[in-house]
Amino acid sequence: MLNLRFVTATRLSLEEFTATSPLVRSLKRVSQTCHVHLDVNANNTAPLAVGFNRAIEQAKDDDVLVFIHDDVWIDDWLISSRLAEALAVYDVVGVAGNTRREPHQEGWIIHPATRAQDVGFISGAIAHGEFHTGEVSFFGKTPQEARLLDGVFLAARGGVLKQAGVQFDPQFKFHFYDTDFCRSCEASQLRVGTWPIALTHQSAGQWQSAEWNEAFALYLKKWGD
Protein backbone atom coordinates (compact mmCIF):
# COMPACT_ATOMS: atom_id res chain seq x y z
CA MET A 1 0.00 0.00 0.00
CA LEU A 2 1.37 3.40 -0.98
CA ASN A 3 2.15 6.14 1.51
CA LEU A 4 0.64 9.27 -0.04
CA ARG A 5 1.82 12.63 1.27
CA PHE A 6 -0.32 15.45 -0.09
CA VAL A 7 1.46 18.81 0.11
CA THR A 8 -0.43 22.08 -0.28
CA ALA A 9 -0.39 25.73 0.73
CA THR A 10 -3.25 28.03 1.61
CA ARG A 11 -3.73 31.62 2.68
CA LEU A 12 -6.42 30.40 5.10
CA SER A 13 -5.78 29.53 8.71
CA LEU A 14 -5.45 25.83 9.44
CA GLU A 15 -8.84 25.90 11.16
CA GLU A 16 -10.55 27.57 8.19
CA PHE A 17 -8.86 25.27 5.72
CA THR A 18 -9.80 22.14 7.62
CA ALA A 19 -13.44 23.25 7.87
CA THR A 20 -13.95 24.35 4.26
CA SER A 21 -11.39 22.70 1.99
CA PRO A 22 -12.59 20.25 -0.68
CA LEU A 23 -9.17 18.62 -0.43
CA VAL A 24 -9.69 17.72 3.23
CA ARG A 25 -13.16 16.39 2.57
CA SER A 26 -12.12 14.24 -0.37
CA LEU A 27 -9.05 12.85 1.38
CA LYS A 28 -11.32 11.32 4.02
CA ARG A 29 -12.59 8.97 1.28
CA VAL A 30 -9.12 8.36 -0.11
CA SER A 31 -7.79 7.41 3.33
CA GLN A 32 -10.04 4.35 3.33
CA THR A 33 -7.90 2.76 0.60
CA CYS A 34 -4.35 3.90 1.46
CA HIS A 35 -2.14 5.66 3.99
CA VAL A 36 -2.66 9.42 3.65
CA HIS A 37 -0.82 12.35 5.22
CA LEU A 38 -1.76 15.97 4.50
CA ASP A 39 0.97 18.59 4.85
CA VAL A 40 -0.70 22.02 4.92
CA ASN A 41 1.27 25.25 4.86
CA ALA A 42 -1.43 27.47 6.38
CA ASN A 43 -1.51 31.27 6.54
CA ASN A 44 0.90 31.02 3.65
CA THR A 45 2.43 34.04 1.93
CA ALA A 46 5.70 32.38 0.90
CA PRO A 47 6.39 30.90 -2.56
CA LEU A 48 4.90 27.43 -2.98
CA ALA A 49 8.44 26.15 -3.47
CA VAL A 50 9.28 26.71 0.21
CA GLY A 51 6.79 24.19 1.56
CA PHE A 52 7.17 21.86 -1.42
CA ASN A 53 10.96 21.66 -1.02
CA ARG A 54 10.66 21.08 2.71
CA ALA A 55 8.38 18.11 1.96
CA ILE A 56 10.96 16.70 -0.48
CA GLU A 57 13.74 17.03 2.07
CA GLN A 58 11.69 15.35 4.79
CA ALA A 59 10.23 12.57 2.64
CA LYS A 60 11.20 8.94 2.89
CA ASP A 61 12.38 7.39 -0.35
CA ASP A 62 9.16 5.42 -0.88
CA ASP A 63 6.79 8.27 0.05
CA VAL A 64 4.67 9.40 -2.87
CA LEU A 65 4.59 13.18 -2.74
CA VAL A 66 1.54 14.83 -4.28
CA PHE A 67 1.94 18.58 -4.75
CA ILE A 68 -1.57 19.90 -5.12
CA HIS A 69 -3.53 23.16 -5.06
CA ASP A 70 -5.64 23.79 -1.99
CA ASP A 71 -8.93 24.07 -3.89
CA VAL A 72 -9.04 20.63 -5.50
CA TRP A 73 -11.57 17.83 -5.09
CA ILE A 74 -10.04 14.39 -5.50
CA ASP A 75 -12.87 12.59 -7.23
CA ASP A 76 -10.88 9.38 -7.72
CA TRP A 77 -10.97 7.58 -4.39
CA LEU A 78 -8.77 4.85 -5.91
CA ILE A 79 -6.03 7.39 -6.52
CA SER A 80 -3.50 5.17 -4.75
CA SER A 81 -3.94 2.52 -7.44
CA ARG A 82 -3.75 5.13 -10.19
CA LEU A 83 -0.48 6.50 -8.83
CA ALA A 84 1.02 3.04 -8.33
CA GLU A 85 0.36 2.38 -12.03
CA ALA A 86 1.56 5.81 -13.12
CA LEU A 87 4.81 5.82 -11.16
CA ALA A 88 5.71 2.43 -12.56
CA VAL A 89 5.89 4.16 -15.96
CA TYR A 90 6.91 7.76 -15.20
CA ASP A 91 9.02 9.44 -12.52
CA VAL A 92 6.76 12.49 -12.31
CA VAL A 93 3.06 12.51 -13.23
CA GLY A 94 0.28 15.05 -13.63
CA VAL A 95 -3.31 15.10 -14.84
CA ALA A 96 -2.74 17.50 -17.75
CA GLY A 97 0.20 18.64 -19.80
CA ASN A 98 1.85 19.02 -23.18
CA THR A 99 3.86 16.46 -25.10
CA ARG A 100 6.11 19.17 -26.55
CA ARG A 101 7.72 22.39 -25.40
CA GLU A 102 8.20 25.35 -27.72
CA PRO A 103 10.48 28.39 -27.26
CA HIS A 104 8.84 31.24 -25.31
CA GLN A 105 5.95 29.00 -24.28
CA GLU A 106 3.88 30.76 -21.62
CA GLY A 107 2.26 27.62 -20.24
CA TRP A 108 1.61 23.99 -20.96
CA ILE A 109 -1.71 24.59 -22.74
CA ILE A 110 -0.90 27.54 -25.03
CA HIS A 111 1.16 27.48 -28.22
CA PRO A 112 3.29 30.65 -28.34
CA ALA A 113 2.69 31.34 -32.05
CA THR A 114 -1.07 30.82 -32.26
CA ARG A 115 -1.88 31.99 -28.71
CA ALA A 116 -4.48 29.21 -28.66
CA GLN A 117 -4.65 25.73 -27.15
CA ASP A 118 -1.90 23.54 -28.53
CA VAL A 119 -4.40 21.02 -29.91
CA GLY A 120 -2.89 17.69 -30.87
CA PHE A 121 -0.12 18.02 -28.32
CA ILE A 122 -1.93 18.72 -25.04
CA SER A 123 -2.92 15.69 -22.98
CA GLY A 124 -5.09 14.75 -20.04
CA ALA A 125 -8.28 16.02 -18.43
CA ILE A 126 -9.56 17.89 -15.38
CA ALA A 127 -12.94 19.16 -14.24
CA HIS A 128 -13.68 22.69 -13.05
CA GLY A 129 -16.41 23.86 -10.71
CA GLU A 130 -17.24 24.70 -7.13
CA PHE A 131 -18.22 21.11 -6.43
CA HIS A 132 -17.06 17.71 -7.65
CA THR A 133 -19.79 17.66 -10.28
CA GLY A 134 -17.95 20.24 -12.38
CA GLU A 135 -17.69 20.19 -16.16
CA VAL A 136 -14.80 18.12 -17.50
CA SER A 137 -12.21 19.67 -19.81
CA PHE A 138 -10.64 16.93 -21.95
CA PHE A 139 -7.42 18.06 -23.60
CA GLY A 140 -6.15 14.92 -25.31
CA LYS A 141 -5.42 11.25 -24.86
CA THR A 142 -3.74 10.12 -21.68
CA PRO A 143 -1.45 8.53 -20.49
CA GLN A 144 1.23 10.19 -22.58
CA GLU A 145 4.84 11.19 -22.10
CA ALA A 146 4.95 14.95 -21.54
CA ARG A 147 7.40 17.81 -21.50
CA LEU A 148 5.24 20.17 -19.42
CA LEU A 149 2.62 19.52 -16.72
CA ASP A 150 -0.05 21.62 -15.03
CA GLY A 151 0.99 22.34 -11.44
CA VAL A 152 -2.51 21.77 -10.06
CA PHE A 153 -1.34 18.19 -9.39
CA LEU A 154 2.22 16.84 -9.54
CA ALA A 155 3.24 13.49 -8.04
CA ALA A 156 6.58 11.74 -7.61
CA ARG A 157 8.38 9.48 -5.18
CA GLY A 158 10.47 11.35 -2.64
CA GLY A 159 13.54 9.22 -3.27
CA VAL A 160 13.41 9.86 -7.01
CA LEU A 161 13.40 13.64 -6.59
CA LYS A 162 16.14 13.58 -3.96
CA GLN A 163 18.39 11.29 -5.98
CA ALA A 164 17.96 13.53 -9.04
CA GLY A 165 18.48 16.68 -6.98
CA VAL A 166 15.26 18.19 -8.34
CA GLN A 167 13.43 20.83 -6.32
CA PHE A 168 11.15 23.80 -6.93
CA ASP A 169 12.67 27.23 -7.52
CA PRO A 170 11.41 29.76 -4.93
CA GLN A 171 11.91 32.71 -7.29
CA PHE A 172 8.65 31.54 -8.93
CA LYS A 173 6.18 32.45 -6.21
CA PHE A 174 3.12 30.88 -7.88
CA HIS A 175 3.17 31.24 -11.65
CA PHE A 176 5.66 29.23 -13.73
CA TYR A 177 6.83 27.16 -10.76
CA ASP A 178 5.38 24.12 -12.52
CA THR A 179 6.90 24.92 -15.94
CA ASP A 180 10.27 25.51 -14.30
CA PHE A 181 9.95 22.29 -12.30
CA CYS A 182 9.30 20.31 -15.48
CA ARG A 183 12.35 21.88 -17.11
CA SER A 184 14.42 20.76 -14.11
CA CYS A 185 12.99 17.24 -14.40
CA GLU A 186 13.90 17.20 -18.09
CA ALA A 187 17.43 18.40 -17.36
CA SER A 188 17.81 15.57 -14.83
CA GLN A 189 16.44 13.03 -17.35
CA LEU A 190 13.39 12.15 -15.28
CA ARG A 191 10.46 10.60 -17.13
CA VAL A 192 7.42 12.89 -17.07
CA GLY A 193 3.89 12.02 -18.15
CA THR A 194 0.16 12.53 -17.79
CA TRP A 195 -2.16 9.97 -16.25
CA PRO A 196 -5.96 9.64 -16.02
CA ILE A 197 -6.85 10.69 -12.46
CA ALA A 198 -10.22 12.30 -11.75
CA LEU A 199 -9.96 15.74 -10.11
CA THR A 200 -12.11 18.86 -9.93
CA HIS A 201 -10.40 22.24 -9.59
CA GLN A 202 -12.46 25.07 -8.12
CA SER A 203 -10.57 27.80 -10.00
CA ALA A 204 -9.51 28.11 -13.61
CA GLY A 205 -6.23 29.91 -12.86
CA GLN A 206 -4.93 33.35 -13.78
CA TRP A 207 -3.26 34.05 -17.08
CA GLN A 208 -1.36 37.16 -18.11
CA SER A 209 -1.87 39.02 -14.85
CA ALA A 210 0.91 41.35 -13.73
CA GLU A 211 2.28 38.57 -11.52
CA TRP A 212 2.12 36.12 -14.44
CA ASN A 213 4.10 38.43 -16.73
CA GLU A 214 6.68 39.07 -14.04
CA ALA A 215 7.18 35.32 -13.53
CA PHE A 216 7.40 34.75 -17.29
CA ALA A 217 10.23 37.28 -17.50
CA LEU A 218 12.07 35.44 -14.73
CA TYR A 219 11.50 32.13 -16.50
CA LEU A 220 12.93 33.44 -19.79
CA LYS A 221 15.90 34.91 -17.98
CA LYS A 222 16.64 31.58 -16.29
CA TRP A 223 16.18 29.25 -19.27
CA GLY A 224 17.08 31.56 -22.12
CA ASP A 225 14.15 30.77 -24.42
Image (cartoon, rainbow, N blue to C red):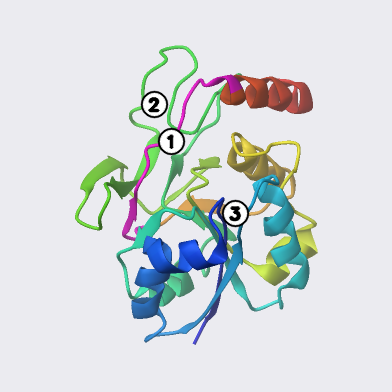
Between 65 and 47, the residue placed more toward the observer is 47
Q: Which mark is residue 191?
A: 3
Secondary structure character of the magenta stretch overall:
loop
| Residue drawn at the location 73% of the way across and 57% of the way down | 53
Q: Residues within 10 Å of mark 1 (few under 14, many from 20)?
A: few
Between 60 and 73, the residue placed more toward the observer is 73
Q: Which mark is residue 131?
A: none
- Quadrant of the drawing holding the C terminus: top right
Tell me whether circle 3 and circle 1 mark residues in contact (CB < 8 Å).
no
Distance of label 3 from label 1 (alpha carbons) = 26 Å
Q: Is residue 53 left or right of residue 97?
A: right
Which residue of the protein is positioned furthest toward the top in this rendering? 113
Between 130 and 137, the residue placed more toward the observer is 130
* Pointer 1 residue: 205
Q: Position of residue 16 (x, y in %)?
A: 47, 62
Q: Residues within 10 Å of mark 2 (few under 14, many from 20)?
A: some
Distance of label 3 from label 2 (alpha carbons) = 21 Å
Q: Is residue 220 visible?
A: yes
Which badge, 1 or 2, comes first in the chain's sequence? 2
Q: Which residues make up the magenta segment?
A: 196-210
Q: Amino acid at mark 1?
A: Gly
Which badge, 3 or 2, comes first in the chain's sequence? 2
Q: Position of residue 111 (x, y in %)?
A: 45, 21
Above or below — where is 133 with respect to 86?
A: above
Q: Position of residue 150 (x, y in %)?
A: 48, 43
* Pointer 2 residue: 118
Q: Nearer the viewer, mark 3 or mark 2?
A: 2
Secondary structure of the residue carrying tag 1 is loop
Q: Amino acid at mark 2?
A: Asp
Secondary structure of the residue carrying tag 3 is loop
